[in-house]
Amino acid sequence: MLGRLVEALGAKVRTDDATLARARADESGHATAAPPLALVEAEDIEDVQAVCRICTATGTPIVTRGAGTGLAGGAIGGAGEVVLSTARMDRILEISPANRLAVVQPGVLNGALNTVLAERGLWWPPDPASKDISSVGGNIATNAGGLLCAKYGVTRESVLALKVVLADGTLISVGHRTVKGVTGLDLCALMIGSEGVLGIIVECTLRLRPAITGPVPTLGAYFDDVAAAAAACSAVTAAHLEPAVMELLDEPILAQVSAYTGVDLIGRGRSFVLIQTDGPGAQQTAEAIRAVLEENGATVEFARDADEAALLVQVRRQVHPALTQLGTALIEDVAVPRDRLADMYVKIAEIAERHGVMVPTNAHAGDGNLHPTFVFAGTEVPPRVWDAADELFRYALELGGTLTGEHGVGVLKRRWLGDELGTDQLALQRRIKAAFDPDGLLNPGKVFAPAE
Amino acid sequence: MLGRLVEALGAKVRTDDATLARARADESGHATAAPPLALVEAEDIEDVQAVCRICTATGTPIVTRGAGTGLAGGAIGGAGEVVLSTARMDRILEISPANRLAVVQPGVLNGALNTVLAERGLWWPPDPASKDISSVGGNIATNAGGLLCAKYGVTRESVLALKVVLADGTLISVGHRTVKGVTGLDLCALMIGSEGVLGIIVECTLRLRPAITGPVPTLGAYFDDVAAAAAACSAVTAAHLEPAVMELLDEPILAQVSAYTGVDLIGRGRSFVLIQTDGPGAQQTAEAIRAVLEENGATVEFARDADEAALLVQVRRQVHPALTQLGTALIEDVAVPRDRLADMYVKIAEIAERHGVMVPTNAHAGDGNLHPTFVFAGTEVPPRVWDAADELFRYALELGGTLTGEHGVGVLKRRWLGDELGTDQLALQRRIKAAFDPDGLLNPGKVFAPAE
């Protein structure tokens, strides 16, 4: 099998220990039990097709991998598997202002693309925290979220069309180069967030927006407790106001990030909400938001200048590094309906206390997406953490929420998949997977647990 | 079979001639060769499940039908089929400003829903021309477009979750009540635009926006010819400007609609573009658009007041009624990349002349969606019209466009489906259809031609 790969792809087939070790893990901290057979650095669509044909002929599983920044173990390769890397397929093929679209290979990094687009007054909105190091293909394969989704949508809203290689090497084109298009089933939308189990994304036609221009008013709001902060954020949404960014930090995070950055936020309140508005009417919207927050108990301050705004944003960005100072940090990713954010925070505190675990939690409060972060000593996740996570997931589902807002299922959440989808839908999803990939070669064991 | 239906559903089963005659046709002008067995007026999810169970047990095809305003023959019932109407499932179940969502039954009319939402400062953006008479379920089943899509997205962007009954009566819930959610494959997105071939939409969780407030500047732009008008519209997009509405009328339409409404637009130019901007910065955007249009050869006038603006909008709305004065009007629905709009207009004129047919064409110029309208005498579509349409479709595909921007495939366009999707993708789409509906009972012959 490896011989056939090398014959077809030469030095693009990597089997050195360092490469294979990297391919076993992602940014979740999780790794497979053993290294994969090989990692293939595809450089074009033909390479991808060649790998698929050889793997189909030999019954070898294929794990597609972008930049490896996933947080759910969705792109990690294990024993007997070939990891198909699209990292070198990183060219921007076209930028069309008149069609407000770009065509790119999947390996281009989100941040690198946006740097080029910005020079032309354009913007691709998906903004996962990892955007400087994560690839467009990976963003699409996970339907990545980020900070701006309540106003600007998730990745799905920013993709027009895809070229996809199926497990047997067949190339198909799904979606449209046009804004509208309803010919047949929407397989482009279905591919988005499919985590490598349906096909391999080899070319992406992206829907762009005009770059945001003008000032970005920035507010810091301090609250006495996190439930009040969460309720205030819900009130902003209920008042029909649209912040671009509305990020909530709870007390444990505020304490740690204040210590880590030296910016004393915890001295000013026990919970903090960072708000930014943008586009036409930004100042007016920011003032209306301030009024709602103050009515809901906040002390609110406008950043006086761009430097102060940048400092607050920087503090928010340091949440994860700050938490890793305390131990291993397992980031969770539930989302709840926006008016249940306060309920979720109350429950998290209760679960944390009962299980004796630390669960500092920040939230993209504009869209109800929380990142409860389990912090523990050592590299093995202790059973009490999984017990606490299990309770937390089930409560999010009870509230009408979801297991994962933006990170994906991967291997880490597949055991809860049926709890959210229900038995009937799970069976249907497996039939759809089989319609794409009858031999079950694409990313087996990811999203869907191995059949029993 | 009919006996079992009546036993289970009583008077909800309609078999009178008038009802069955209506169920054979939609607004496309096309009708089936013979009436269906029955039309069932479902009043709740249990009714839908009961129909599905009986139809599955007896091998009877099911045609789901909303308000019957389709333009592609997607919801018309024929011999041996049961038409399942969701028109009576028309309740609004919930409106949540704090979650910016509404939960509705599929039969509620788009316009009726938006009237209720407007009282609360909210808005569901999909705006097909039929919105006062078309249902939310039908809008979703066709991924309906409209005038506002370039700025506000198509229906897919405005749906969070669905309850769906499968052919065998199984009820599943797809999508999320949350803004973000990536648990499993995105079957909610897949259902949108699926034209009744995968499942029956029985409950809809809709993503709302704050209602647009403030003035809506309205511009009329007059051009010497339609290609210049189309090119000017492309220039607006390329200049990163975002009109809410940008509607283009060509010379034959302008002549006819001027005569029909008594508003003399044809005296002022041979092509007309109606533009509206809205939201924060609307006036500034409108002025920037005026400048681009003037640079591209237009004579531009702002509507002086709300009455004059309403008059221009009203003229645009009279396009279809005006054309039906000339004969039978078959509306087509191609979409092309926005910078190819002028090319498409040139080709349409050439095709019309060569085949000796009239093809007045308006366009949603902001998104590249054209409605070439074939006008002919009598009710039968003459062969030369299909020949001309065939050329027109193929040229749209050549330009990187699509057969149908917003009306759907139904029965009228299924013969071109493989030309757009390709043989491999068409086979995959049929396998997905079979994963949902193994017995092929849901809307057979729609979208996908009967297997040969």
Image: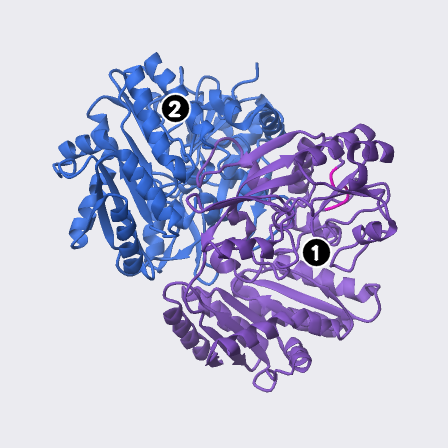
Chain colours: A blue, B purple
Image quadrant in which you'd find residue B82 = top right
Query: Residue A440 at x, y = what percent?
Result: 58, 24
Residue A121 drawn above or below residue A336: below
Q: Is residue B52 left or right of residue B216?
A: right
Q: Nearer the viewer, residue A298 or B187?
A: A298
Is residue A167 among the parts visible in the rendering? yes
Residue B370 drawn above or below residue A75: below
Q: Is residue B142 left or right of residue B390?
A: left
Crowd tier of the residue under label 2, counting other residues whose Cα lies within 10 Å: few below 14, some 14–19, many 20 or above:
many
Which residue is at a point 33% across and 57% down the rendered structure image? A212
Query: Residue A444 at x, y = what percent?
Result: 52, 23
What is the chain letter for disc 1? B
- Residue highlighted by disc 2: A392
Query: Residue A310 at x, y = what percent?
Result: 20, 48
> For residue A29: magenta?
no
Q: How many marks?
A: 2
Which region of the structure is painted magenta? B442-446
Q: As shown in the figure, which amino acid type bears the numbered disc 1?
A: Thr
